[in-house]
Every structure is written in C-alpha cells, then in structure tokens.
Amino acid sequence: MVLNSDIKEILKKNQLSVTSSRERILQLFLEQQGALAHGDIEKRAGEKIRSSNGVSYATGICGKRNRSYNTYR
C-alpha cells in the first residue's frame, strides 16, 4: 500500500501541483505492476482526464500517441 504522504512527496519532487486527480492517478501507477492504458486509467480513476486540446487536466502532459508510461517509480 502506498501512503498518501509518499504520493504527495513524489508530485512535489517532480514540481507538480498536488491535486486529487494527480494523487489518484499516481496511486494507480504505483499499485500496478505493469503499464496502464489511457482507458484503464479513466475507468479506475472514475473520471475523464483529457481536455478538448489533448492536454491532460490531471498531469499537464499532452498525449498525442496511445502509449502507456509508468515513469514515477
């Protein structure tokens, strides 16, 4: 189990604002053994995470390609 304080520290360490969406998404990645597809993240987080211009509200990352990354470990 990942502690909420650990998740917040990871976000801060990577100079990201701490938001509930980012915390949920990061927790999903930290608890998952492998990569997560975009659709899996949305299902598990219970929310849509892309704006109309393709930039994620949760992460601030523009995802033009359909790839899954697990880079916070």
Image (spheres, rainbow, N blue to C red):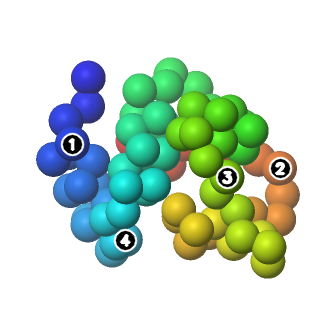
Q: Secondary structure at mark 2?
A: loop
Which one is in front in this view, the residue at disc 1 or the one at disc 4? 1
- Marks 1 and 4 sit apart, C-alpha to C-alpha, by 15 Å
Left or right relative to 16: residue 6: left
Mark 4: few, some, or many residues within 10 Å (few <14, many ≥20)?
some
* Residue that carries the numbered disc 3 in the rendered image: 48
Visible residue check, residue 41: no
Mark 3: few, some, or many residues within 10 Å (few <14, many ≥20)?
some
- Residue 43 spot, x, y in % from top left: 65, 34
Q: Secondary structure at mark 1?
A: helix
- Marks 4 and 3 sit apart, C-alpha to C-alpha, by 19 Å
Amino acid carrying mark 4 in the image? Leu
* The label number, if any, that marks residue 66 in the structure image: 2
* Residue 9 lies in quadrant: bottom left
Give 49 or 35, whichever is nearer the viewer.
Answer: 49
* The label number, if any, that marks residue 4 in the structure image: 1
* Residue that carries the numbered disc 4 in the rendered image: 16
